[in-house]
Structures are given as C-alpha cells and as structure tokens.
Image: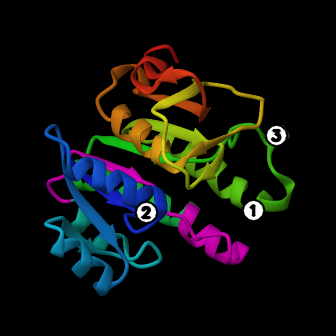
Amino acid sequence: MQVLVAGANGKIGQNIVKQLHNSDQHTVRAMVRKEEQAEELKKKGIDAVMANLEGRKEAIKKAAKSCDAVIFTAGSGGSTGADKTLLVDLDGAVKTMEAAEEAGADRFVMVSALQANNRNNWNEKIRHYYVAKHYADRFLQATSLNYTIVRPGGLLNEPGTGKVTASENLLERGSIPREDVASTVVASLTEENTYKCAFDLIAGETEISEALKKI
C-alpha cells in the first residue's frame, strides 16, 4: 500500500514512518506542518508533503492523492489547551477522513486512546481530549472507509518488546511503548481481522501479529 501518515513528526508518527520506509510491503508519504520537517524527511529519502490539520481540507486531500491508506496519529500535544485539542484531534481528524474518502484512499487507521469508547472510564484530568477522541472515532465508524481504531494506553518512550495485549474492551489501565503502538498500527494495515474494528492496546505477552488475529 501507499500510506499517508498524518502526524508524521509526532513520536508515534516518526516510528510509523520509519517502519513503513523500511518495509518491502508498503511505501510511505509523511504529512507534516513545517517546511523544515519536510526537508529533514526528504534528506532521508522519504516522500514528505506539507499540510496543516487546522487548515483547509483540500490540502490534506492533495496530500492523500494516489494513496491507498491513511494513518492518523496526529495530536495537539499535552501542552496546548482544549481549543487546540478540538481543532486537531477532532476537527483535524474528521477533515482527514473526508479528504481520504474524496481522494479514494479506502483504508484508514486511527490512533485513539485507551477506553475512548467508554465514557465511564475516561481520565477526568484530560476529559476534553477523550471527548475529541470519542467523537472522532464515532465519525470514522460512520464513514465508508475500511477503518481500524487502535486505542493505546499510557505511552512510553522505551524500546518496544513486540508483545502486546489487544482487546475490544480492556477495563484495566496499562501502558505501552510508542514503538509497539507503531508496529501494531503498521501490522493492522493488512490484517483483515482488524478491518472495521476498534480495540484497546497495552503492553502484554502476545506477539503483535498473533494478538491482532485474536481480537
């Protein structure tokens, strides 16, 4: 697949771009906001395009042209206010879905948040973030796109283990290395068991490929 990564400069996004770039199964196009970010990627031989999730949908649609799949792993970040969360994590996500549909990219993988589907289990300190994720996920499920929603737990910067716990409903809190989230997202692209599926993801004892087959 030719895969557009929205949020390519984020920590999970960088891992996804690296894995796709090194893949013999896929090609990657990294979508970033800043020219210097695009130039840095191009120096590594990575196809990079500029589009702002707070800007016009047409720019995202242009970025998605000729792509088979879109991965959305963008986020406003923990240091911004609720307004940016709504603009990026919700409206930016929805614009990317609309752009994907209009550009003809059938596959869409969303990086969400653990238990975003379950209002009774949201983290009260960042409730606005969960609201954005919840409704972005629901919008995605109502589109014509062949979606997968990956809802990871607390994100760690340590090296991945390649082993996870994945389930449609994990009530227990847990964490996971960002590298393993990226590996799960990339594996989901072609794992048919994840098509039209949403699941929670934390560190575990099962190889990623096997965990996805058992959801």
Are the two marked residues, 3 and 1, in contact with CB atoms closer than 8 angstroms?
no
Amino acid marked by disc 1:
His
Which label was assigned to residue 128? 1
> Residue tagged by mark 2?
95
Which one is nearer the viewer's eye here, 205 or 209? 205
* Residue drawn where x is 43% and y is 42% of the image: 143
**Mark 2 / mark 1, whichever is N-terminal:** 2
Image: 50 above or below 101:
below
> In the visual, does 67 lie left or right of 202?
left
Q: Magenta residues?
A: 65-89
> In the visual, does 153 lie left or right of 137?
right
**Mark 3 / mark 2, whichever is N-terminal:** 2
| Residue 185 picture location, percent across and down | 41, 40
Which label was assigned to residue 90? none
Which one is nearer the viewer's eye here, 2 or 9? 9
* Residue drawn where x is 14% and y is 54% of the image: 66
The answer to whether any part of residue 201 appears in the image is no
Measure how far apart labels 3 and 1 are at the Cα level: 13 Å
**Mark 3 / mark 1, whichever is N-terminal:** 3
How crowded is the residue under tag 2: few (<14 C-alpha within 10 Å), some, or many (20+)?
many
Callout count: 3
The answer to whether any part of residue 174 appears in the image is yes
How crowded is the residue under tag 3: few (<14 C-alpha within 10 Å), some, or many (20+)?
some
For the N terminus, the image quarter is top left
> Residue tagged by mark 3?
121
